[in-house]
Amino acid sequence: MSGTDDRADLPSLERGKDLSRIFAFTDGVFAIAITLLVLQIEVPQGLTSNGQFLDELNNMFPDFFAFAISFLVIGGYWIRHHRLMRMVREYDQTLMVLTMFYLAWVVLIPFSSQLIGEYGTEVKLTTVFYILNLALIGMAMSLTTRVIIKHGLGEPKYEWELKSSLNSSWYVTAVFLVTAPIGLLLGGWTPMLWIVLMRLDPFELERRRKAREARKTQSG
C-alpha cells in the first residue's frame, strides 16, 4: 500500500510548472546558434598588405551580410520566444515536443546562412532554402503558441496578447512564404523586403499601441 502511495506522489513529466529547464535549454540553443554564425566566416590567410586586406573584406561582404541578417533573425525569434514564454504558467508534453521542433529549425540557420553567404548571388535556390528555413521556425512558433492557448498553459490575464502573438507569428510565416519565390529573382537581397514587411505587421503594431496606452495610463 505504501509503495502505491509513493508512486502516486512522483512528479509527472507530462505536465508541470517548473519551466526553468525549458528556458535554460532554449536560451542555450539560441546562444550556440548565434555563435555559430560568426564561426562560418573564415579569417583570410596570408595577408601581406592593407590593400590585400581591403580586397579580402570586399570579397567577404556576402558572408558578413548573411551574418548580419541571420543575427537579426535569430535575435528577433529569441525575443519573440522569450516574450511568449513569460506568458506561460505551466508546460505539457506537447509544448515540450513543439519546443524541440522549433529549436531544430533554429540550429539549422547557421548552415542555411552560410549557403546564402557563399552562393546567394549565383545559386538563388539557396536563398529559397534559407527562407523556407525561417518560415518553418515561424510555423513552429505559431503551433507552439496555439498549443499554449488551446491547452490552457498561459496566464489568463495574457489571453489577448497570446492570441495577438499567434496571429503575428502566422503573419511572419506568411511573409517568408510569400517572398520565397521572389528569392529566385533577388537572391541574397530578398531579406531587404522583410525589413519593410515586418514593420507592417498589424498585430505587432496593435500590441505596441496597447503597450503605449498602458504606460500612459500608469504614468497618469
Image: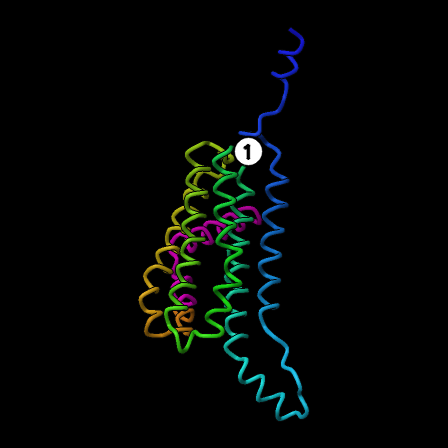
- On screen, residue 152 versus residue 64, left or right, reads left
- The residue nearer to you, when weighing 53 against 164, is 53
Q: Residue furthest front?
A: 46
Q: Amino acid at mark 1?
A: Glu
Q: What residue appears at the point 52 percent right and 39 percent down from the top-left corner?
A: 96
Secondary structure at badge 1 equals loop
Question: Against 98, is 204 above or below?
Answer: below
Q: Is residue 195 magenta?
A: yes
- The residue nearer to you, when weighing 214 against 180, is 180
Q: Is residue 133 magenta?
A: no
Quarter location, residue 2? top right
Q: What residue appears at the point 62 percent right and 91 percent down from the top-left corner?
A: 52
Tell me the chief SS of the magenta region.
helix
x, y percent for residue 42: 61, 75
Q: What residue appears at the point 58 percent right and 48 percent down from the top-left corner?
A: 26
- On screen, residue 73 versus residue 192, left or right, reads right
x, y percent for residue 106: 51, 55
x, y percent for residue 15: 54, 29
> Which residue in the structure is indicated by mark 1?
90
Question: Against 176, is 52 above or below?
Answer: below
Magenta span of residues: 194-220
Q: Looking at the figure, which quarter contains the N terminus?
A: top right
x, y percent for residue 185: 32, 74
Colouring rule applied to residues? rainbow
Q: Residue furthest top?
A: 1
- The tally of labels here is 1
Q: What residue appears at the point 54 percent right and 48 percent down from the top-left corner?
A: 83
Question: Against 16, is 188 above or below?
Answer: below
- The residue nearer to you, when weighing 177 against 108, is 108
- Estimate how packed mark 1 is, as few (under 14), some (14 to 19) or many (20 or more) residues with alpha carbons within 10 Å: some
